[in-house]
Amino acid sequence: MPRNPGMTDEAIIRMYKSGMSIKEMEPIIGLSSRAIRNVLYKQEIPMNRAQYSGQPRKNKVNEDFFKIWTHEMAWVLGLFVTDGHVNKKYHSISFSQKDERILNLIAKYMEADYVLAPTGPTRTIPLLMVNSKEIKKDLEILGISANKSLTVPFPSVPEEFLASFIRGVIDGDGWVQKTGYVMNVTSGSQRFAEGLLSIFQSWQLRTEITTTVSSAGNHIYRVWVKGKYELPKLAKIIYNDAATDNFIVYKRHRMSQRIDD
């Protein structure tokens, strides 16, 4: 069985030392448990019984995080809907973000150990991993499950926390024009895109959906907000409940630059 690209002995060792079980490492590395153990033996890495047996690593995390609505939870949920992944085989989830500061902040809010998956030639974007059967179950209750990208619904978010959720969505999959006239959010789920459109309409923003088809034949939906006065109006809504740092800085700047015009 060949290794997945970029999975060197050094990458395997880093992954193991981060606390991952050998069973969790299998699909990432592309090797069997036996082959992974052989690499560790060859490199004289001490073996931990829990990891060796395949039990999930015991990282700290607040397992009630997605049970109680707060502005921080809503923002993290928005990020997860757009940039998160639910592991189909194991009780784990992960967040990917170019801005590692955001991953640190997510870990802080979730009271989680900061466990990053190793990067390599085929994946250069930092990936924060969280292991919890309970959190995975709570996300499923919210409609977010494995292979969610084409089917995820727009979650039922309490009105009080809706702006923070949308801020997370824009931070995750939003594009904002440098001049601050245009913004869009991309989704593979028609249900999610239509839900987002409905929210923008309820905020009386100039909005629309466009659809394209990917090379794989999947529909790609883009929800737009356009206009010199529309983006500052949206910014006033979604940053009203933001803390000093829970947002992508350049997106806030681009959306807010005409706020006094």
Image: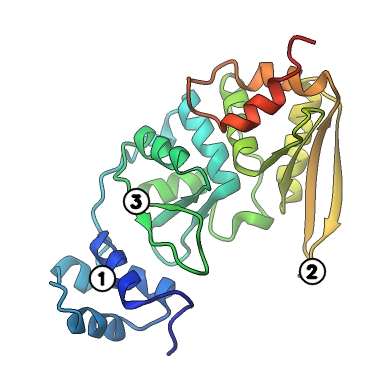
Q: Residues within 10 Å of mark 2 (few under 14, many from 20)?
A: few
Location of mark 1 (residue): 54
- Amino acid at the residue labelled 1: Gly
Considering depth in this image, is 218 or 135 the residue closer to the camera? 218
At 57% across and 30% down in the image, what residue appears? 249
Circle nearer the N terminus (1, 3): 1
- Amino acid at the residue labelled 2: Ser
When asked about the image quadrant of residue 1, the answer is bottom left
Badge 3 marks a residue whose secondary structure is loop
Residue found at the very far front of the displayed protein: 179
Identify the mark at residue 215; answer none if there is no mark. 2
Q: Residues within 10 Å of mark 1 (few under 14, many from 20)?
A: some
> How many numbered marks appear?
3
Q: Nearer the viewer, mark 2 or mark 1?
A: 2
Circle nearer the N terminus (2, 1): 1
- Amino acid at the residue labelled 3: Ser
Do callouts 3 and 2 mark residues in contact (Cβ within 8 Å)?
Answer: no
Compared across the picture, whether 15 is left or right of 257 comes to: left
- The residues tagged by marks 1 and 3 sit, at their Cα atoms, a distance apart of 15 Å
Residue 197 position (above or below residue 144): above
Identify the mark at residue 132; answer none if there is no mark. 3
